[in-house]
Image (spheres, coloured by chain):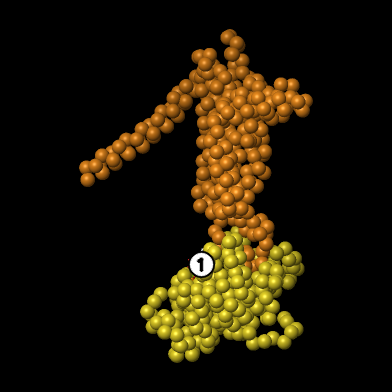
Amino acid sequence: MSGDRITKALLFISSLTILLLGAGIVLSLFGGAIPAFREFGLKFIVSPAWNPTTGSEEYGALSFIAGTVITSILALIICIPMAFSTSLFIAEYYNGTRTSSILRSLVDLLAGIPSIVYGFWGFYALRPLLVATGLSDQGFGVFTASLVLAIMIVPYATSLSAEIISMVPAELKEAAYSLGATRREVIFSVVIPSARSGIIASFILALGRALGETMAVTMLIGNANVIPKGLFAPGNTMASVIANQFGEASGLKLSALIAVGLLLFLITAIVNALGKLIIKRFA
Amino acid sequence: MNNTPQSENVLEIRDLFIAYEPGRYAVKDVSAHVRRNSITAIMGPSGCGKSTLLRAMNRMHELYPNIETKGDILLDGQSIFSMSVIELRRKVGMVFQRPNPFPNMTIYENVVAGFSLNDIRLKKSQRDDIVENALRNVALWDEVKESLYRKGTFLSGGQQQRLCVARAIAFNPEVLLLDEPTSALDPIATSKIEDLLGELKKKYTLVLVTHNMSQAARISDDSMFMYLGELVESGHTNTLFTTPKDPRTEAYLTGKFG
Ligand SMILES: Nc1ncnc2c1ncn2[C@@H]1O[C@H](COP(=O)(O)OP(=O)(O)O)[C@@H](O)[C@H]1O
Ligand SMILES: [Mg+2]
């Protein structure tokens, strides 16, 4: 009996600690961002300026918001066909076979590779390829970053969608088969429509991942503090500008970086909440 | 429907064996026939192979990739294993244990789902006719004619099950297979379905799996009693219920098992 109470108390304390930690992070982000917002107001969000020269200091987050949104959306567009077809293959076409379970473990393995390794691979394997095509001088830029980002989120989106697809009730598929539908007709008229909202949600969650991804993007995007001028032009994302500059930042610049972090936090929180909401309604 | 002279038996099951895993037979050496425009009840304790036998009649059992089938089933004298499954399933429709209308489709779309799934294009007027006819045949038309374009999942369980019957008969099949179609329904909905089956046998041949003996006694013309994968006894329902030949049938009918 008393052992039970001790366990309960311990669990309560750890949950409370997590709650306090979360609240603390949000509070310190807000606190740290106040000077920047006091100085630039809401203009901070819509201005692309990033000028740390003492005397004419001016900071705005738009370049990084643009970099983040463009790379993430592009990554998502590249990811969708790959993840969608792989999840159908795993969860429907080859469901229950050896091939499917091998592929499933492979996808999980890919999902577990640290982002720095993807970054390395992008830097030494992918970037030279892009240089060879002549599309880009040094191979850095939005496209390279998006491509690696896409490869990073494919396993995540795949395993979520596969989960959703395998939740489509067998009795619906049987109903369709009993009406003389072929495999293809069952998949396109029953499985995909029934799983649609869940599949969409898994891509939204994958987008959430892409938005916050830092290391690999920082290594490949070219780190130019401007709105990217094209697909192969360099830029910077919200996460990578923080990673690049926090070390030597102080004063107003530090506050501006924290404000960028706060915005990133808000954007990913909203995207993730949206995805989770749709998943919940689906299940 | 058919130009060839129609024999009394729609389905002939010959020495049928079915195993989900090699050597483990769920259906063992079953031979039987199903008479035209009758209701044949398949009874037996849970796990005795009723659903497996029923699903073999339109080859739904082949959805399990490792299944092994020996023997034959003839539909109007032709082996169902030599037909295309798609043809077969249009002639032999199926209704399941739990009502399963397509949740993403309206009532109207559910009824014609068999056509749209198979990419069969119909004129709007043809579709309207099929929908109205099928829904009238399952006594659902008056209840849903105002809400044809609402989702089928808003209906009550019994209405959903009748919608599923309508979906299955929209093709005008010869045979309708029903796997415990009332086991998820309340008594009132159940008796409506039972009345409906009595009507439907005028047009179709029905095979009904049921765990409910009194249901079999009430509505079926012929009965089969299965036990551990074997067909223990079959024949006219009256005879089988009043003078069972096999002691296992008698034990089942008197409630000794399952
Ligand atoms: N998908 C399956 N895989 C393996 N064995 C199965 C499967 N479905 C049914 N069986 C087995 O086959 C036997 C008959 O099952 P079933 O036809 O569903 O019986 P009933 O409908 O009479 O309850 C049971 O022993 C059951 O365990
Ligand atoms: Mg069964």
**Percent position of residue A18, x then y:** 39, 34
| Residue B152 visible from this viewpoint | no
Q: Residue at x 63, y 36 (%)?
A: A150
- Give percent across and percent down for residue B144: 59, 71
Look at 75% across and 65% down and name the residue there: B121
Question: Which amino acid does the dot numbered 1 rest on?
Answer: Arg
**Residue at the top extreme?**
A55
- Report if residue A258 is visible in the image: yes
At horizontal 59% and vertical 45% (from top left) the residue drawn is A103
Image coords of residue B122 (percent x, y)? 74, 68
Subunit ID for the residue under disc 1: B
Tell me what residue is drawn at x 24 percent, y 42 percent.
A3
Residue A147, picture quadrant = top right
Of B135 and B113, nearer the camera is B113
Of the pair B5 and B215, the residue shown nearer to us: B5
Q: Residue furthest right?
A: A134
Display colour for chain A? orange
Residue furthest toward the front? B23
* Label 1 residue near ligand 1, CB within 8 Å: yes
**What tint does the image give chain B?**
yellow
* Residue matched to label 1: B24
